[in-house]
Image: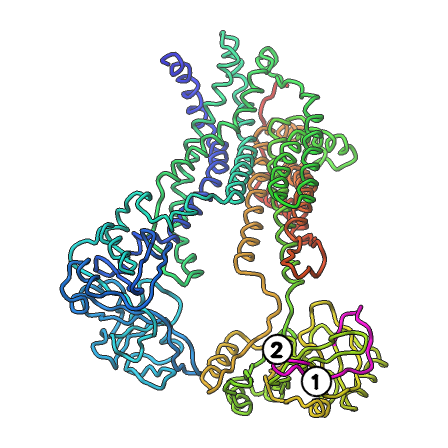
Amino acid sequence: MTGWVTGWRVPLRIARRDARRARGRTALALTLLALPVLAVTTADTLYATSSVSGAESVERRLGAAEARVELHGNGRAFQMFDPDDGSGWRGRGEADRDAVAAALGLEDLDAQTVRVREGSVRFDTDRGRADAQVLVTDLGDPLTAGMVELTSGRLPTSTDEVVVNARLDDRGPGVGQDLVLASGEALRIVGEAESAALVGQPFAASVPGSALEPRGVSSLLVGGDPVSWDKVRDLNALGATVVSRAVLLDPPPESELAPQVQAGMDVLDEAAVTAAVLIAVMVLIEVVLLAGPAFAVGARRQARTLALVSAAGGSPRDARRVVLGSGVVLGVGGSVIGVLGGLAAAWALRPVLQGYSTGRLGPYDVEPLHLAAVLVFGLVSALLAAAVPAWLASRQDVVAVLAGRRGDAAPSRRSPVVGLVLVALGAGLATYGARADQGGETAIAGAAIVCVLGMLLLVPVLVGAVARASRGLPLALRFAARDAARHRTRTVPAVAAVAATVAGVVALGIATSSDEAQSAAGYVAALPVGDAAVSLSYGPAGRNADAEEVRTALLSVLPAEAADRVEEVRGVVTDGFVELRAPGAGTLLSSTNGVLAGDLLVSEAGLPSFLRGVEPLSAQQQTRVDEVLAAGGVVALSNTGDPAVDEVRVVDHPGGRGDTERTTLPATTVPVELDQANAQGVISEAGAREAGLEVATTALVVRGGLSDEEAQDAKEVVAGLPGPAGLYVERGYQPPEEVRIFQLVLGGLGAVLMLGGTLTATFLALSDARPDLATLGAVGAAPRTRRAVAAAYALVVGAVGSVLGALVGLVPGIAVTYPLTRPIDYGFGTTGPAHYLDVPWLLLGVVVVGLPLLSALVVAVASRSRLPIVARLE
């Protein structure tokens, strides 16, 4: 052991001195190693901060109490240590309150506890009505301290007083005014306070007995002695669930949990574990490739030192240790810098993260074990990045190096063959995964790693091919291509890093775009994009909103020019179940009580303008539609494959019993796009009367686009009217927020890694090529030639890597779309295509063309034009 430590002492000392001497190269290497560590540390810390554990939520949920007890009934309950993580109960009737008090060691349950009730209420705003989250408890009791934070005014002391937060103040009344509830009762606002648990939504709090109190089960705050897990189980036996401060802060072993809640606790999501492992492997490969050029250049600069070590009797192992020592020194330094930077970035990004959450984040949370793992990850990445240069350095020609010549060993001829085999194997795995019924995603993910590894072995061949093809190019490009081929030890990792990044971006981009294409294809718009509808909720037994009252209220908040764009929509309302059957075609239409979702609409003059999915009509079809509606008939919206009809029979199923034919009406069909129609058909008012159908105004349609602010005002106005009316604004298919964030992160991360790898490799190459560039200057090259060479080198590295990465990324990207977009049959058959493929050409254009050009421009601007003349011996 002592000999092993002694053997590493000198290599580490040489590595430390070399890092001090070559500060620029050291800074670049530290940056490459620190960036991924910083990103992982930031993400881990933000996740830990956003995940509010039971112990971190004690104050906001319990205040200063020792426990919060919820009585479900006379029965038995079971729960996790935190009942919000899992609980259940069975029984009936009311809980035995005396027994609960005895279990808590209390004489009078009501007198020695504080009641808490949470929920939501509807209140009047400046425009209409909106919903607010409410907390009803004795806010002046010491047990509730910490549940709300008073920012101005005072806390309520009577049932006719209330405090609200700033969000509610912005939409409605403020301090000194009345908060009017939907029930008509008014509460005086005596202060402004923020909830300790919620943020970004209206909030109000008052005392028990006020009109603000919502319905539902109330909780009891209990003070006094800590409530142990034994007491919690005793209370569970009485039908109560308990949030105990003592249990949350110091939970007992999981074996103490009831069998009902232990089931499934240790079940791992195999897909999630597989994805995590694959992501870790891909990130490790990426970091190794990014840092590889720095160690390659470092080994080149240390070539004479290593040769002297060998000449003095050192073994190849000693030479490898010198280069690996640089990996240890830079790995430790980069990891520490990355962790510290990630902690600072997470602290700075907390307000940004809070903006995406309605729940208040927990305290700034650092996971020491996770950070230790990240530090080890950074060190391992550095050692792996230094492994190949160390191995090559141990094989260099000592005599050639001491003579001042390059001592690189000849490249292996077997590596390209192995690379082709791996790429073929990856393609085979991807094909298998695309066709597999189950587990295809895992096979495709494995295929992505195999393809990337095969690609690494093919990069030297591709770089050499580019150099040979550069014969007719301008000097700068020819010089850059040939220099890249000559110094493969630093060029190959840089090109491979760019290629691996682009491959990952392309594969994930195709998968995400195709998945979104399937979701968008399955979305049925209720209205043309930009239009809005107010559903008046007509029904046989429901309360009806008055159409004219709704129209007037809408025009009071909409722009004046919107007045003429409010249209009436008429639909079918019937006590029975009415079908329109076409002879020989079976059931053609079936009436419903909804609106804009399968209805038979009423129109006298042509098809309503808000119909969706209707294909353009020819002059002959338009004439036929007008004739049928004028004759009191029906226009059916049908798929292209449905038979044409000339008449329909109106068949009544009163209460679902028997068939009664009401009448026969003239008809025609209009083709619509598959699954895109927002109605079943159109009937004239005369035809509806003849069929005995009730015609009613079911909605108002607002033509033209509404801004978000106008839509919010209109919703509040409609919510404040009597009757169940609601506003819907058609925005078209909107990708989920997490998908948009993922796409932004994917593009940003890919751009950073690609630019970082290209720029760093370029500057390292320029540092290594200073003698060549100085010689160019000595023989008469213009000063701007160095800028052109620098930009050309960045262009060669970026372009070769991005094109190769895009080709490799297409394999798993296209393959994964098959299992990802395969339709699911729930027993009713499937509709739509069996496979969706959407290639994000804009993303490919940016990473394949835009980023290499951008990196070349950055290098050209940042490079010096003139260099001092240096001596060279080769």
Q: Nearer the viewer, residue 786 or 510?
A: 510
Give the answer, above or below, for where 150 lies relative to 761.
Answer: below
Mark 1 Cα within 10 Å, few/some/many (few <14, many 20+)? few
Residue matched to label 2: 531
The C terminus, quarter of image: top right
Q: Nearer the viewer, residue 390 or 563?
A: 563
Return the residue found at the far right. 620
- Residue 388 position by quadrant: top right
Residue 644 lies, in percent from the top left, at 82, 75
Q: Amino acid at mark 1?
A: Thr
Question: How are the colours assigned in the image?
Answer: rainbow
Residue 345 lies, in percent from the top left, at 41, 48
Q: Is residue 450 left or right of residue 671?
A: left
Residue 394 lies, in percent from the top left, at 55, 16
Residue 55 lies, in percent from the top left, at 29, 52
Q: Is residue 484 left or right of residue 270?
A: right
Tell me the magenta residue range.
Answer: 637-658
Give the structural element (helix, strand or loop) at label 1.
strand
The N terminus, quarter of image: top left
Mark 2 Cα within 10 Å, few/some/many (few <14, many 20+)? many
- Residue 638 position by quadrant: bottom right
642 falls in the magenta region: yes
Can residue 783 be seen here?
no
**Gap in angstroms between the C-alphas marked 2 and 1:** 39 Å
Return the residue found at the far left. 107
Q: Amino acid at mark 2?
A: Asp
Q: Which mark is residue 826?
A: none
Q: Which mark is residue 660?
A: 1
